[in-house]
Image (cartoon, helix red, strand yellow):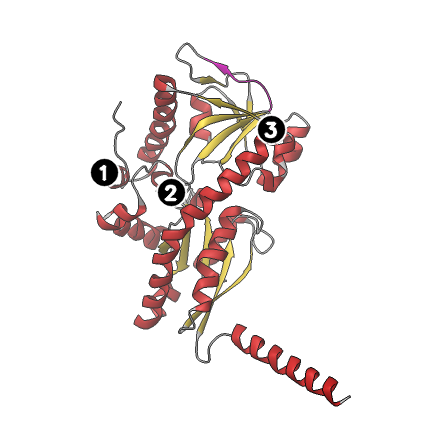
């Protein structure tokens, strides 16, 4: 009996220690965070596992409490909610609020590393845009090396140059993919990501664009028949903070956050590359055929993808040429 009581007391004490360890440090400021993508999406998982969790373990003057994704706020309304101060941090594709920050197109069409962008003045320019247009501070852009692909349920056709011809295909598209798919001749249909499965199943659309990760997470590996390579774009998944909240942070809090972000931007891409390989294996096991464009066909495909995005940005932003000079290098053939 005495032994049982000692065990119970020891267990309770151990549980108390664990609980205390998980609580924010006394006096620490707790930031609330929301993601624009589903909680199950690999990009959201990267944010939570590579920034939120490590920062909270650092035991400093700042912690982050992740409160949810699309279950908390509709993705296209999240940036406006952040600006109003309904929460403090947003991790989301800028594509979801491209109407507010069209410069998110520049992030999509970038082929310069985030490290170089931070050094060449591009980061300051992007942050100026987010300050002005979204009322937010650009905190991190960690998964920029994650590319996008075209996925189809029908066999792709090609033009005389070997570039995909989508003239008879209906594609699910957001602002991210619409310029490319229309340039390839497709009819585009706006559709929530949660509706893609039903859209494919019912034949409302025959294809969609998506990052190289996350297709199995949506169960779409069961319906996709073809994936076209190479991948195009860089994901514009960005972490932003309400500008007033950012300005209210102490130097110590900002330094702590920047330290965590610096590590986040080192480990996020290897993390995403691992997920991409795992997803690729799942797709292949499901029988998805990878159509690999090569040589001039691949170069023209990528040129169309990036060219259409920069063209679109030119119509919408006075910063287009400045951003292109910092974020893009013309490929050498």
Which label lies toward us, 3 or 1? 3
The residue carrying mark 1 is 325
Q: Whole-percent x and y of residue 149?
A: 47, 31
Disc on the earlier residue, 1 or 2: 2
Query: At 25% across and 30% down in the image, what residue appears?
Result: 330
Q: Whole-percent x and y of residue 72?
A: 58, 56
Q: Secondary structure at mark 3?
A: loop
Mark 1 neighbour class, 10 Å CA radius: few under 14, some 14 to 19, many 20 or more:
few
Query: At 50% across and 19% down in the image, what residue appears?
Result: 166
Q: Tell me how many marks there are.
A: 3
| 222 lies left or right of 17 | right
Query: At 44% across and 12% down in the image, what residue appears?
Result: 159
Residue 224 shows which numbered tag? 3
Report if residue 85 is visible in the image. no
| 171 lies left or right of 323 | right
Read off the magenta span. Answer: 153-158
Q: CA distance from mark 3 to mark 1?
A: 37 Å
Q: Whole-percent x and y of residue 230?
A: 42, 28
Disc on the earlier residue, 3 or 2: 2
Name the image quarter holding residue 322. Answer: top left
The residue carrying mark 2 is 104
Taking depth in this image into account, of 270 and 116 the one nearest to the observer is: 270
């Amino acid at each position: 009996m005495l032994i049982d009581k000692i065990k119970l007391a020891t267990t309770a004490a151990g549980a108390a220690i664990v609980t205390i360890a998980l609580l924010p440090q006394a006096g620490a400021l707790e930031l609330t965070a929301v993601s624009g993508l589903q909680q199950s999406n690999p990009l959201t998982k990267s944010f939570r596992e590579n920034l939120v969790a490590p920062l909270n373990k650092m035991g400093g003057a700042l912690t982050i409490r992740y409160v949810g994704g699309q279950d908390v706020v509709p993705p296209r309304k999240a940036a406006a909610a952040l600006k109003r101060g309904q929460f403090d941090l947003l991790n989301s594709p800028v594509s979801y609020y491209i109407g507010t920050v069209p410069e998110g197109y520049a992030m999509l069409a970038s082929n310069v590393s985030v490290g170089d962008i931070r050094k060449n003045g591009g980061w300051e320019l992007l942050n100026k845009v987010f300050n002005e247009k979204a009322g937010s501070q650009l905190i991190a852009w960690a998964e920029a090396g994650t590319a996008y692909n075209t996925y189809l349920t029908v066999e792709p056709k090609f033009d005389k140059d070997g570039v995909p011809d989508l003239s008879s295909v209906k594609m699910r598209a957001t602002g991210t993919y619409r310029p490319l798919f229309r340039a390839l001749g497709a009819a585009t249909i706006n559709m929530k990501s949660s509706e893609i499965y039903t859209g494919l199943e019912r034949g409302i659309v025959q294809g969609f664009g998506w990052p190289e990760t996350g297709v199995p997470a949506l169960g779409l590996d069961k319906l996709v028949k073809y994936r076209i390579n190479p991948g195009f774009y860089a994901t514009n998944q960005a972490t932003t903070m309400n500008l007033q909240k950012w300005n209210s942070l102490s130097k110590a809090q900002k330094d702590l956050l920047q330290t965590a972000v610096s590590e986040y931007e080192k480990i996020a891409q290897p993390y995403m590359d691992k997920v991409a390989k795992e997803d690729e294996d799942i797709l292949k096991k499901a029988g998805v055929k990878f159509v690999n464009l090569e040589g001039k066909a691949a170069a023209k495909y990528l040129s169309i993808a990036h060219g259409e995005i920069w063209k679109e940005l030119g119509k919408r932003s006075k910063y287009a040429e400045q951003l292109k000079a910092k974020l893009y290098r013309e490929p050498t053939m």
